[in-house]
Image (cartoon, grey):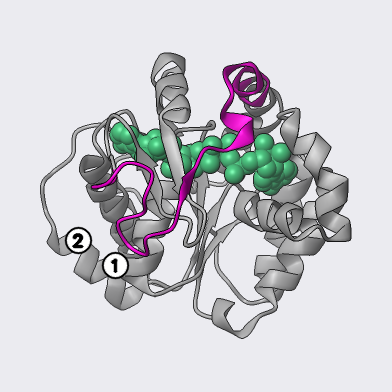
Amino acid sequence: MRDSCARVVYGVVAVDFYFSAVRMAFKRALIFLGPPGAGKGTQSKRIAQSCAVPHLSTGDMLRDAVSRGTDLGRKVKPIMERGELVPDNLVMKMIEERLDRQDCTGGFVFDGFPRTLPQAEHLDRILDRKGFGKPIVVEFDVGPEKLLRRLTGRWTCSVGGEIYNVDDAPPKVAGICDHDGGKLIQRRDDRPEVVKDRLAAYERQTKPLTEYYRRQGVLDTIDASASMDEVSRALAKIVKCAQGCDGRL
Ligand code: AP5
């Protein structure tokens, strides 16, 4: 247990040196739980880059399969367009194959996985088999109005996947990615009528995982309605704290 660590981090101390400490010692599975638009993708890209570990987004993997027109992509396209979750067996096979790759031996950041109890139980077994300790799990807490505003204002680079927002993180030139000049696109499942169903799926199928991980003593909750930098600092604090307290890293 991380007795000395706050379980709910709402006040954030402005201490940038946390990131350097995290960078030196990251070797765990980090799981981000949270509703659509909570900022999981934004923060996982940042922390994965800082810590030089893979960012494993099941949403990105599935969208890639759809855009390449693979068998998997053809199966999941209509499901994703309705805002429903893809069946567990398809997601678990995809993630298991990804975790077998060499770049995953030193730790990774999950974005959007696990999303159901069977996925979480399956992941526990994989982590155990691969000799990882308990994951670090962070719940992103954001109210529904802000989620809708973030999702309808989101634009994503069609080349590198960089995430922008017309209100909070606009590109320098409208419609063009600052990093690689790629065209910015809006996700089909960010239409308000689909967002409603995605939020419902989160409440019904994914939210119960917070209790699953709370019982294991590995869950922290952050106020993800704060600015992107404040959320990053809160996350860095949690990860550093988790590393220090169980002494495995
Ligand atoms: P997925 O791609 O995982 O989408 P999601 O979980 O719905 O999450 P989002 O990507 O919409 O939001 P996010 O939390 O990453 O927010 P972001 O950082 O982009 O899943 C899509 C679909 O794939 C699912 O519906 C399902 O069908 C399928 N799927 C995926 N995984 C699955 C699984 N494991 N099992 C079954 N099915 C699965 O930020 C949003 C916006 O807000 C951006 O514009 C960003 O710039 C802005 N923003 C972020 N943080 C802040 C901040 N702090 N302040 C202001 N603006 C911010």
Above/below status of 167 relative to 115 = above
Please tell me how crowded label 1 is: few (under 14), some (14-19), or many (20+) other residues with Cα within 10 Å: many
**Residue shown at 68%/71% (left/top)?**
98
- Asked if the residue under mark 2 is in contact with the one under mark 1, i.e. CB atoms within 8 Å, the reply is yes
**Residue shown at 65%/30% (left/top)?**
208
The x and y percentages for residue 246 are 40, 64
Is 225 inside the magenta-drawn segment? Answer: no
* 34 relative to 206 in the view: left or right: left
Q: Which residue is mark 2?
A: 18
* 133 relative to 121 in the view: left or right: left
Q: Which residue is mark 1?
A: 22
* 142 relative to 107 in the view: left or right: left
**Residue shown at 27%/49% (left/top)?**
232
Please tell me how crowded label 2 is: few (under 14), some (14-19), or many (20+) other residues with Cα within 10 Å: some
User: In terms of secondary structure, where does tag 1 sit?
Assistant: helix
Quarter residue 230 falls in: top left
Above/below status of 77 relative to 98 = above
User: In terms of secondary structure, where does tag 2 sit?
Assistant: helix
Q: Which residues are magenta?
A: 171-199
Q: What is the residue that sits farthest to the left in this orientation?
A: 14
Q: What is the residue that sits farthest to the bottom in this orientation?
A: 102
Which of the pair 181/19 is nearer the observer? 181
Is 186 inside the magenta-drawn segment? Answer: yes
Residue type at numbered disc 2: Tyr
